[in-house]
Amino acid sequence: MGKNHPNVEPYVASRVRALESLLLEKGILASDTVDKVVGRFQDDTGPMIGARAVARAWVDPAYKRLLLDNSAEALAQFGLRYDMLNVVENTPDVHNVVVCTLCSCYPWPVLGLPPAWYKSPPYRSRVVIEPRSVLREFGLEIDDAREIRVWDSSAELRYMVLPQRPPGTERLSEEELVPLVTRDAMIGVADVPSPALVG
Amino acid sequence: MNSVHDMGGMHGFGPVEREENEPVFHDAWERTVCGLNFGLLRARAYNLDEFRHGIERMQPARYLASTYYERWLAGMTRVLTEKGVVTEEELDRRTALIQDNPDATPAPAASSASGEPFQPPATTSGTHPFRRPAAAPPRFALGDAVVTRNIQPHAHTRLPRYARGKRGVIDRLHGVFVFPDANAHERGEEPQPVYSVRFDARDLWGESVEGREALYLDLWETYLLPA
């Protein structure tokens, strides 16, 4: 367990059970609500849809345009109904990175549940004021000439980064590109590594 | 409100700590909290803005000492007790009962009766639950120079402290959305345009900026004045 999750007092677990049992008794929630909600997040979402959209955008310029201009229509191609997403594109001149300083806003339907670090005070406090230092800690060195754009998700829009296609992938198909696309690259704290470098 | 949740630009939290092979939940109770919260939002026991404001009102030292889902639990119970859905007393009593009888199973309750397929919570998927039709043309256009209001509300707001009284430029028009500052306080929706505003990092942080950097925030129209 990381620092963000010290051992939890049994009290908290008991209090959660107490709250759940009261809500069930009062008829506010059904006994299967938790399983249905969480099952959906654990099984049906995840970085898969985001990665598939990125891979398709890399091989299909028309799809890339659609993803950037009308993400709802672009995501519908993967069977997802989601119209709150803005996709921002990394280029040789611009690197994008996403945060929510006030809470933990994150595009769950395309990226899955957020990692603990994304929701942690160090990331939320620092990436807006010293993005270059934070990205360096993630192993990402951004050239001085390149502009960093930090997207602080302050409203009900969500952000996903379209990373640059790594060199050495020119011969790969859309299907072969999908597994290269990482969650961290779509948050903007990493580049997609070249498969030649990965080995 | 100016509490510790509004931490953009603060110093002293140290390096970003990542966890290898992080599980989705670290404990069964975290999974329950997550499921309960989305169930409660969907059942309209409270709205997302009320929930966020419930977390923001945690005592700052306690907020920082809590894990993520402990903060959720605190925000949920705060709002549920304020709305009278459950009382502090019955929650305390039930918690003590479970601690004394850890193996007791809670009373059985009905599963979702009708058998209709579960719909994902409106806050995370589907057609945008906070978008509203435009009632009037937006006040600002692409490229307009704006300055954010310098406000210090005790109530809920989505204008972070680091971006108050700052100059920016309208970068995108997102359409009309429910206003959280009203919706968190049972004041109705007060829908209004939301803009993506671009701030030069130097206008926010001054000389400490490390290089070419810009901040983008999605801001409601009443946060903005013509520059």
Image: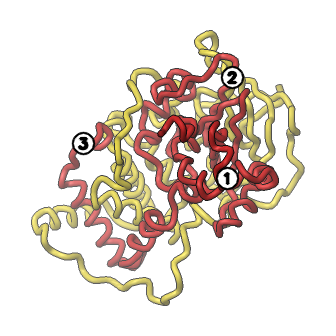
Classify 10 Å Cα crowding around label 3: few (below 14), some (14-19), many (20 and above).
Answer: few
Classify 10 Å Cα crowding around label 1: few (below 14), some (14-19), many (20 and above).
Answer: many
- Residue A85 circle label: 1
Question: B25 or B80: which is nearer to us?
Answer: B25
Chain A palette colour: red
- Looking at the image, is A144 positioned above or below residue A67? above
- Residue A17 appears in view: yes
Horizontal side of residue B140 vs B190, given as left or right:
right
- Residue B159 appears in view: no
Q: Amino acid at mark 3?
A: Pro
Q: Quadrant of residue B168?
A: top right
Q: Which residue is mark 3?
A: A6
Chain letter of the residue beneath label 3 in the structure image: A
Classify 10 Å Cα crowding around label 2: few (below 14), some (14-19), many (20 and above).
Answer: some
Distance from Cα at disc 2 to Cα at disc 1? 24 Å
Foreground: disc 2 or disc 1: 2
Give me the residue at 62% from left, 39% from top: A168
